[in-house]
Image (cartoon, helix red, strand yellow):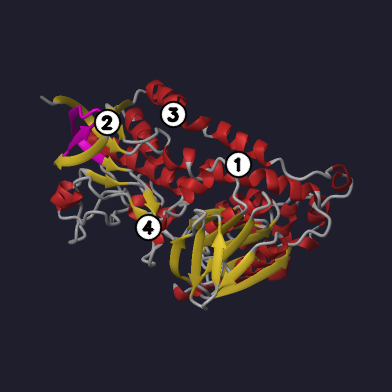
Amino acid sequence: MSEIKDYDVIVLGAGAVGENVADRAVQGGLRTVIVESELVGGECSYWACMPSKTLLRSGALLRAAQKVGGTREAVTGPLDVAAVLKRRDDMTSNWNDSGQVEWLTGAGIDLERGWGVITAPREVTVTAEDGTVTVLRAKHAVAVSTGSAALMPDIPGLRESEPWSSREATSAQRVPVSLAILGGGVVATEMATAYAGFGTQVHLIARSGLLTGDEPFAGEMVVESLKKLGVTLHLYSGAEQVERTEDEGFRIRLDDGSVLETDEFLVATGRLPRTFGIGLDAFGLEDGAWLDVDDSMRVLGADGRPVDGGWLYGVGDVNHRALLTHQGKYQARAAGDAIAARAHGHDVSLEPWGAFVATADHQAVPQVTFTDPEVASVGLTAARAEKAGYRIRVVDYDIGSVAGAHVVADGYEGKARMVVDEDRGVVLGVTFVGQDVGELLHSATVAVVGEVPLDRLWHAVPSYPTVSEVWLRLLETYGRPEK
């Protein structure tokens, strides 16, 4: 007979997003349980953000040292790949989630391990690995925070050949001699950068070029850097057929007729929502589809209204608004606070920039791609701003011309772009490409989210000599507003 447990809130998925939904609900005075079928901490902690950036960091530091006189002469050895992999293992706690479980306990969040299915309104049935069944009932809300999984395109022989997804690439215990990567986005370019730094012979196959969602110059600069790292680029090309070789490698036929043979093959062509098999079809939603939500993350039905009165929430990757851990956590804070407020009978306003909404998802999303050079952007690109109907001016500046860049690296190469709304005199978007520019991005995010007028930005004085001085140069290039 199944055990029944009553709560105020049930959260499906104990990744970073689910943890934050649960934490905010508990802080709002609600008894909360989180359901997880894998590791507490989720994709970001064990197979995505943390291990991938750890794999990239050592190579980036080595190359940075080689760009500065004095350290260039001192650092003469190659990267210690075994030490890099060991550091990655430490960063993921060797894929042991006991520390994360301890955090849940300290935060007052209950944990139910197993596969959760929504079997009735505000009810989740959890089947544990040993077959034990537990029925959880929520008084107020169920939040789906189950994340996303790697997309495998429909290419003959691909699935049967069992290529790497991002999970295998970030958790590999050995470095292959050769690696083919299919895709031109963040995962593909970052893993090409990491493995090329390990000495792997990398082939990157990208049908539409690299980082096409960013300003065009970002992809162009990453192309040149990958070439310098020894990556063989197959741009505007695709894979037609994949098969295993006799020595357990991969044979990949490209659409130009050429054939690649590599030890490993990473497919990084996109993501799918992990909403399959969790019972959403019983509420008029498509099994395995992205969830449409309002700004407080309530799931919406085909009629545009909250499903079944508004007890169901979809937070993080599952709603396809911004597939980024930091943006999912931002959504989680809004959702958890909204759940608690509604539970206590308070009004929840969906007005932009309020306490219970994730307004920044729409056109103020920051993102760093940790290639070499890094690509850091927030807000709208010039093309997207024009498409949205803004009257814009684009301001570009060579970051290498800033005095602080000369301190950072000999021959620093980088570019900054500011997209300005001419009618309001505010910044709509900023892109930086260059070494360590990820640390510049939050200043741009504040400017975009805060809609800081350009005439006020003139009074935000950058320290000298730092790369941040690029802000002054962008403003000077734009011209001082008359006021």
Label of residue 129 in the image = 2
Question: Local crowd at mark 3 within 10 Å, few (<14), some, or many (≥20)?
Answer: some
Q: Nearer the viewer, mark 2 or mark 1?
A: 2
Amino acid type at mark 2? Glu
Label of residue 97 in the image = 3
Relative horizontal placement of residue 324, taking residue 300 as reference (left or right): right
Q: Earlier in the sequence, mark 2 or mark 1?
A: 1
**Residue name at image x 33 percent, y 39 percent:** 13
Amino acid type at mark 3? Asp
Q: Earlier in the sequence, mark 3 or mark 4?
A: 3
- Is the C-beta separation of discs 3 and 4 under 8 Å? no
Q: Which residues are magenta?
A: 121-142
Image coords of residue 36 (percent x, y): 32, 35
Label of residue 160 in the image = 4
Q: Nearer the viewer, mark 4 or mark 2?
A: 4
Relative horizontal placement of residue 269, taking residue 113 as reference (left or right): right
- Is the C-beta separation of discs 3 and 2 under 8 Å? no
In the displayed structure, 210 sits above or below 65; it is below
Query: Marks 3 and 2, Cα distance to the nearest angstrom?
Result: 17 Å
